[in-house]
Image (tube, rainbow, N blue to C red):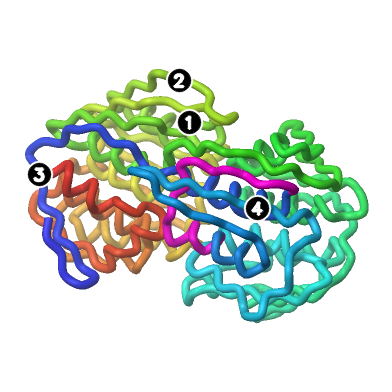
Amino acid sequence: MSQSYSNILVNPTATLRGVITPPGDKSISHRSILINSVANGSAHIKGFVPSDDCMSSVNLVRALGCFVDVKKTNDRVDVVVKGVGMFGYDEPNDVLDAGNSGTTARLMSGLLASRNITTIITGDKSLRSRPMGRIVKPLREMGSLVLGRNEGLNLPLVFAGGSLKGISYVMPVSSAQLKSALLLAALRANDKSTIIQPNISRNHTETLLQSMGASVDVTGNSISVTPGELNSVDVTIPGDISSAAFWLVAASCHKNAELLVKNVGINESRAGVITVLKSMNANILVENIRVVAGEKVADITIKSSSLKGTVIEGNIIPLLIDEIPIICVAAAMAEGTTIVKDASELRVKETDRIKMTTEWLTKAGVNCEETDDGIIIEGSGTINGGFYNSGSDHRIAMSLAVAGLIANSPLTVSHHESANISYPGFWETITKLTN
């Protein structure tokens, strides 16, 4: 593997063997920082992932008056957060910049709603193009005064006070970020709130809030929260299944592979990629299952597999929405047709991931078709090398890298550094596996 500024060359490898421990879960890392910032007391967070996105959350709570100490010990990053209480944020002296992190911007919107301080939150060019109206509309219904570009549809957003009231709200989309923003705002409302989601999405916020003493009741797709204070809680963060997914697909597609991926979080609201790979006939073994800090964790062995096409739709989509770009690599190498539908949310990620994935697969010689809410892929068992544009989308860049490991010739990925948004150390792992 060789690299130049912004581009990196990935060479196909004859074998793919090793042991990998993916970085800490990005979703839990964000939440452990953001939610503990408004709790009472100090929290020790073990296994935090210092990705660009998660450091955006650290920087924002620091700007709001919280003490956050980030320390690297051997191969692990630990963090101490001293909470300021539910109403303790200071008014920042500058605009809050969430960078590329939708999680930071949306969850922080819930935390900033209707405070007696004025705050402005923005992000990079990509984040400023992503939809915020889905957050702003219910926050305004709760009584928050929110101003924003395009009438609140896009960042920057200005939070300028208001008084929160309890709400019963039916979410228009299954989004863990939207759900989390409303739950966090509801903690400071004048009465109980109930949030109803179309399908179950990742549940890390509810789990963490319950462990911090919040009155949160989950019944099916309905979540009710009663306003109240939070107590700080220590968090041990498992490996990120979204990061592990790249290696699971790489090994299942490679002709001579066996990887052990250790300490992977397999929370039922996140483990859709395992379900799909099993449905594709992947040679996958999930073992040593245990519970760490309330989250189910396992070690996963994955070997070369004779993959088959499958249909991915409906309730499972929110459980693997971030993994669909890499699953499409598996679909390209599988025998038969894979259909992804009900995944229109992919169009409003860092890039339009349906369009980006269809375009690069087509260039790679894979027969595929873009649909309104997904993609249809005719597996060919072959991916052509060449130069591919990641669009600075971290998940597209890493999916292209995996494709390079199994391609028929070297593959160059543009803007490879975007992987740092979620997976610092990704390229070092590629080097380790291929040398």
User: Which numbered disc flags the more N-terminal residue, 2 or 1?
Assistant: 1
Choose between 48 and 351: the one closer to the eye. 48
Do tag 4 and tag 3 residues touch (Cβ < 8 Å)?
Answer: no
Q: Which mark is residue 435?
A: 3
User: Which numbered disc flags the more N-terminal residue, 4 or 3?
Assistant: 4
Q: Which mark is residue 82?
A: 4
> Residue 281 falls in which quadrant of the image?
top left
- Label 3 residue SS: loop
> What range of the chain is rendered magenta?
40-57
User: Which numbered disc flags the more N-terminal residue, 3 or 2?
Assistant: 2
> Residue 165 falls in which quadrant of the image?
bottom right
- Residues at marks 2 and 1, CA–CA distance in whole angstroms: 9 Å
- In which quadrant of the rendered image does the N terminus lie? bottom left
Image check: 414 left or right of 197?
A: left
- In which quadrant of the rendered image does the C terminus lie? top left
Do tag 2 and tag 1 residues touch (Cβ < 8 Å)?
Answer: yes
Residue drawn where x is 27% and y is 60% of the image: 360
- Report the amino acid beneath label 1: Ile
- Label 4 residue SS: strand
Residue found at the very far right of the displayed protein: 190
Disc 1: which residue: 266
Image check: 289 left or right of 165?
A: left
Disc 2: which residue: 289
